[in-house]
Image (cartoon, rainbow, N blue to C red):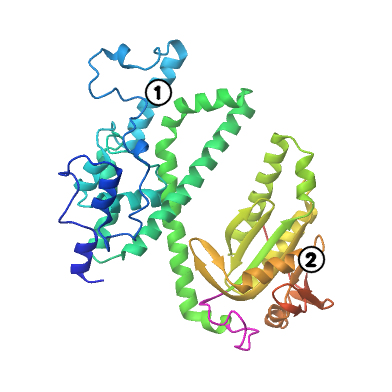
Amino acid sequence: MNAENVHQDIDLAAPDLPREPEDAAGSAAADSDAGTAFGSEAGALIEPAAETELEPDEPEPNEAAGPAEAEPVAPPTGTMSAERLAAKALEARLLGGERKLRRREVAAGAGLSLLSARKLWRALGFPNLGDEDVAFTERDQAALSTIVDLVRDGKLTEEAAISITRAIGQMTDRMVVWQIEALVEDMVQEHGVTDAVARKRLVSELPNLIDPLEEMLAYSWRRQLNAGVQRLAVRAEAGLQSSEEGREGDEDDAPLPLARAVGFADLVSYTSLSRRMNEKTLAQLVQRFENKCAEIISVGGGRLVKTVGDEVLYIAETPAAGAEISLALSRAFTDDEILPQARVAMVWGRILSRLGDIYGPTVNLAARLTALADPGTVLVDSMTAAALEQDERFVLVPRPAEDVRGFGEIHPVQLQPGSGRGLILD
């Protein structure tokens, strides 16, 4: 992308602020700008009713009454009034000030068309807002300018900017929900209050946690980015030799770029167990499962890609690292006095990494093998077994051939610990 195209795409010459208010059809026509920045979703505008809907706390523009009369309902009193004040103070701190700007003002301040700004806001996971909604602060404008400047300076393409923005939105959304639920659960257990009371109290407790949580977020991001850079260096230095272990070059995944050990761990009888548990017990089981998996995978040098209910997906840089993690997971769940046993499978092959997830036949085969594994055992495929057969830390026991949907006949191999202590957890 050259500088001329960047300038044209992000619509620097035509910010939207000077435009007169439009109806939905006019807005769609004005914002369409075929070929403008951040994709071609010009027709995906919000419904007209939502465009002009005011925030519940905002008075009508022609409202002349005093503060009490401007409220659509009777003002809260006592405890509710204090909670509302606390919530507004917390919002101002989190958003960097009071909401004073409308969406067109923010977009124009960043030198963007409204269409481009809305694509970035959608990527972040923000709800649709109307032209008259006073919903933004100066910090919103500064954040928009930050990502747009990366495109203007040629450091990111528009597609990369959208993808990175979406990653930030989705990851922080999940993180915030996780943190809030953890804090609420802690209040319920420690103070003996109900869930509803804990959620109200959390508003007054959060101001004391914002700075340390924000500091830990930035710290963790830098550490994780450094770890990612180190993995890139390892791949460049020694990855090519490792990536060809056990391969002949004609495998289905050959065109994919990254060689990784891909593993699944699936709790046995989770569905039937969850039906017999109350909310608290189920939450404790899920949290114990995820914590144990995360600890073992990180100690083994792998990466937890995601958890889906009773199943965890993970990757490692080498066949041996994947095997060590897989055996440690199987052993941990077998020895756990609360959690059921797990079926575990691991496949060494090539994958495509996108959107924080992984794709390709290697992932699919690992999932199929997991379903074939007996509780408390680890299965690998024949290619993975070939990559591990010279390693004394592992014992490989062939299993009868199986016909697997999408793969035909495969030859599972049971992975067992050999010499050595295996993965050591503190």
Question: Which residue occupies the foreground of this view, 273 or 182?
Answer: 273
Rendered position, 387 above or below 172: below
Q: Can I make out residue 152 in this image?
A: yes
Residue at 45%, 25% (x, y): give it. Answer: 204
Hey, what amino acid is under mark 1?
Ala
Give the position of the C terminus as an image quadrant.
bottom right
Q: Secondary structure at mark 1?
A: helix
- Indicate the position of residue 267 as horizontal and vertical percent values: 74, 54
Q: Would you say residue 423 is visible in this rendering?
A: no
Task: Check residue 23 for magenta coloring.
Answer: no
Left or right: where does residue 56 sit relative to residue 281?
A: left
**Residue at image mark 1:** 86
Label 1 neighbour load within 10 Å: few <14, some 14-19, many 20+: some
Q: Position of residue 106 (x, y in %)?
A: 24, 43
Give the mark, 2 or 1, whose residue is nearer the N terminus.
1
Magenta range: 244-259
Q: Residue at x 29, y 50 (%)?
A: 28
- Residue 403 position in % (x across, y down): 78, 76
Q: CA distance from mark 2 to mark 1?
A: 53 Å
Q: Amino acid at mark 2?
A: Ala
Dominant SS of magenta comes to loop
Tell me the quarter of the picture where residue 390 sits. bottom right
Asked where in the image residue 134 lies, by quadrant, the reply is top left
Q: Is residue 248 magenta?
A: yes
Q: In this view of the protein, which residue sits in the foreground, 274 or 319?
A: 274
> Which of the image's four quarters has the N terminus?
bottom left
Instruction: State the residue position of label 2.
Output: 373
Answer with left or right where residue 199 lies relative to residue 368: left
Residue 414, image x and y in percent? Answer: 79, 72
- View extreme (right): residue: 400
